[in-house]
Amino acid sequence: MTTSIDRRVKTLHWAGLAVGLVIALAGLANVLPTYGVLPRVGPFELDWFRPLFYWLCFLSFLIWDALRLTRDDKLTVFHLLGYAIGLGLMTWVSWDYYQVSMVLKDSFMFFSAREAWMAAIPAVLSIIACWRLWGAPIAILGAVVFAYLATGPYWPGVFQTIVGDMNEFIAQNIWYDASQGILGNIMGIVLSTVLPFIILGAVLEGCGAGGSMIRISFHLMRRFRGGPAYAAISASALFGTVSGSAVANVVGTGVVTIPMIRRRGFSGNFAGAVEAAASTGGQILPPIMGAAALVMADIVGVSYLAVILAVLIPAVAYYVSLFLAVFFEAEKLGITAREEDEAVEPPAGQDWINLALVFGPIALIVWLLVSGLSPAGASIAAIFLLIPMSFINPEIRRAPWKLLEALAEGGKTVAQLAIAIAIVGIVVSTLNATGIPTKFAVLLANAASSSLMAALLIAAAGCIVLGMGMPTLPAYIAIVAVMGPTLTGFGVELLTAHMFVFFFGVASVITPPVAIAAYAAASISKGKPIGTAVEATRIGAMIFLVPFAFVYNPALLLGTEAAASASLGFVAFSLLTLAASLYLASSALIGFDKQRLPVWERLLRLACAATLLSPYVLAGAAALGLGIVLAVWRRTAKLQPAEAL
């Protein structure tokens, strides 16, 4: 029996890799730019490529689900029957999309009840797939929004929609329109911009540079009292800027870093929290950020380089806050630096050579973006550079097929994201068709009583709630579709408003109760899931505070109009107050600054930190002075001197 299960698992595993490889190669061919005399392959016709691509993604999901059940010995004939029916229906509606597109090319047609029911099929299949793949939250959101689209005329008050033919309304907004719905513009952005970066991240992971980054990070940080935790932050920052996925980052680096953090003397909850918080920041760390940042550039209408430049200061500030949190926690626990208990082997010469596999492609991407090449073109060029470079690693020379496996894994990741994006397409199309964002903006403006702070708090809460158990990209798009008009209505720049929503969408993966990155870390650290999530929220608290800072002080977002018009002195003062705020907030949240801090001082430090991030210059200057007094008072107190960091 076990042999039979192993054989089925192996078959499904290779089938999944084969479909993933087709997805990766087809997606890259679609966006492959022209190089010299080589003819351009894509972009392919939307009429046949998008439905075919989504069909492949759905097939990849079915194989993944079958593999999951087979490993647990739970796959039954009823599951197989469901897979066959689902794949048959998806094949039918994908072919019908192509046929209808051909008709619309040469003429026009009025959608009937047939097309409305046909559009409902991929919507229902996508909701079911999302439930099994990503969990209940995003699936329930899709189901509620789809039901609202179909029943809008019967809802009360401001939620009532006025439409003509419901058959036309549903068919066009769900399936048969290349600009909206499941296969609309959002899916197009994923295919044209996000896909190459996901493939690049997969190849970077597969070429063997991850282990080298971990060993080098531990080696460089070994003399510090918080050494393993600092190494975890450094390795996760590098790994995260490549992968763009917090959970993948936790699993990829946490299996090594978390046990080392615990061995140094930190608690299981804290060890998992450091890894989760550091891994989460990978999505906001340039130059290769999460998929949401790529989509943001397209929606806002700016270059990806502008997004990278804008997020630079907030991203660095976040990682500085993580180092400070570890510093204060190590002081509080009395942890000392020691090298003899580290189990990670020192880096060999090959490890330093392998760093070229990370920094080479990243440097090329930055140079090409500065030169004006598109993000997709820059990422594909980096892939072309990375594949031959990867042979400097002996592991790849011995097993070059690992590169194909990496491409296939990247394709599988794209397929899983596409399933979630299908739901987002339904949500965004419904919002646009029903006018809910405009109605919500009016209601919110009234509720907020013309207060930008109230609007920001509501937007932040919405991002966190919607992002619970949902990938960052779908959460970001869904929230910004509703809240974007409201924030810009208060005078917030478009890029700043999107960046605010983006940060809170990223933060949702460490925010309890559904903190998927923290839970993944807890499974490794053997800590308590909720306890790890609470610790991660405390350690990474600046990811919640920094967005308010750059909304009220847009000069912190380099490259924006506010930053360009600000004087050098004002920018310098903004950076000084930001640094002071990081110090005060981190020490207050840990409750230690050379000695334990009483509750009143922790609250006072938090108040100073918040004031430093406010737009009021005089209040900020006063808070800066008070904060310096508190810090100097504690650091110069006559206590038993702690060991140097």
Image (tube, rainbow, N blue to C red):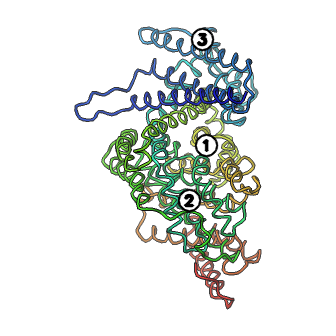
Q: Where is mark 1, residue-wise?
A: 483
Q: Which of labels 3 and 1 is toward the front?
A: 3
Q: Nearer the viewer, residue 485 or 582?
A: 582
Q: Where is mark 3, residue-wise?
A: 115
Crowding around mark 3 (Cα neighbors within 10 Å: few <14, some 14 to 19, many 20+) is: many
Q: Where is mark 2, residue-wise?
A: 552
Residue 544 on image: x %, y %: 63, 57
Secondary structure beneath label 1: helix
Disc 2 to disc 1: CB gap under 8 Å: no
* Amino acid, disc 1: Met
Q: Nearer the viewer, residue 281 or 113?
A: 281
Q: Quadrant of the C terminus?
A: bottom right
Q: Quadrant of the N terminus?
A: top right
Residue 419's place in the image compared with 545, above or below, is: above
- Distance from disc 3 to disc 1, alpha carbons, whole Å, reads 32 Å
Secondary structure beneath label 3: helix
Q: Give the mark nearer the N terminus: 3 vs 1.
A: 3
Residue 17 on image: x %, y %: 53, 31
- Distance from disc 2 to disc 1, alpha carbons, whole Å, reads 17 Å
Rendered residue at 68%/64% (across/down): 262
Residue 101 on image: x %, y %: 47, 14
Q: Give the mark nearer the N terminus: 2 vs 1.
A: 1
Q: Nearer the viewer, residue 152 or 421?
A: 421
Q: Give the mark nearer the N terminus: 3 vs 2.
A: 3
